[in-house]
Image: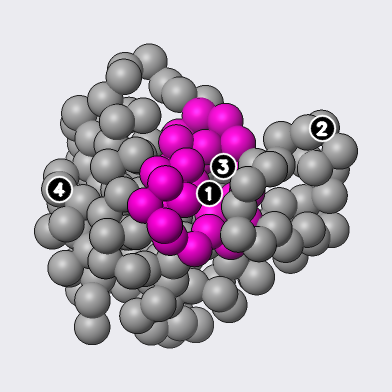
Amino acid sequence: MQRICVFAGSSAGAKPAYLHGAARFGSELARRGLGLVYGGGARGLMGALADAVLEGGGDVIGVIPRSMVEREWAHPRVTKMQTVGDMHERKALMNQLADAFVALPGGIGTLEELFEVYSWAQLGFHHKRVGILEVEGFYAPLLGCLDRLVDEGFVGRQTRSLLLLETDAGRLLDALLP
């Protein structure tokens, strides 16, 4: 395993623990010599994550649509920035570059990216692991919803088990390793 793709909020969120969790995860990536693939942003959890990897001497690849570069949202210090035409290209390239996926707290974009790679795993389009770093119970309601989908017969237990969950960055990375 060489690179982890991380989906995270472009804002800091309501609790300082979210930024701290993103920075802690980035530091752990760098400590283990794992590269980061992410959305290329400089703000919020995305920025804290990338900064921590860079400060730890790690490799950071940002993948960002041209329109976001034009809005000056791109991180200026990443190791390599890949500019793409749109969000579909962004997600395809992030998938291509990464060996596993992790979601940190975030908004609709983070959830959309998480569920796309989770769905792809269910369908066998890739065999990469997908995980969530749980920070301050942020994902608890979503996980409850997924469990309800299992209970109601819309999602199989095997599919539910494809989504890994940990509250500790190191334990999550251990779980993602093949």
- Residue at numbered disc 3: 109
- Residue at numbered disc 2: 71
Q: Which of 43 and 127 is in front in this view?
A: 43
What quarter of the picture does the N terminus occupy?
bottom left
Which tag, 1 or 4, sits closer to the chain's start? 1
Q: Contact, CB < 8 Å: mark 3 with mark 1? A: yes
* Quarter location, residue 135: top left
Dot 1: element:
helix
Q: Does the magenta stretch include residue 65?
A: no
- How far apart are the alpha carbons under marks 1 and 2? 22 Å
Which tag, 4 or 3, sits closer to the chain's start? 3
Q: Where is residue 120 in the image (x, y as percent from the top left)?
A: 48, 73
Nearer the observer: mark 1 or 4; the answer is: 4
Q: Contact, CB < 8 Å: mark 2 with mark 3? A: no
Please state which amino acid type lies under the numbered disc 1: Glu
Dot label at residue 112: 1
- Look at 19% across and 31% down and name the residue there: 137
Dot 4: element:
loop
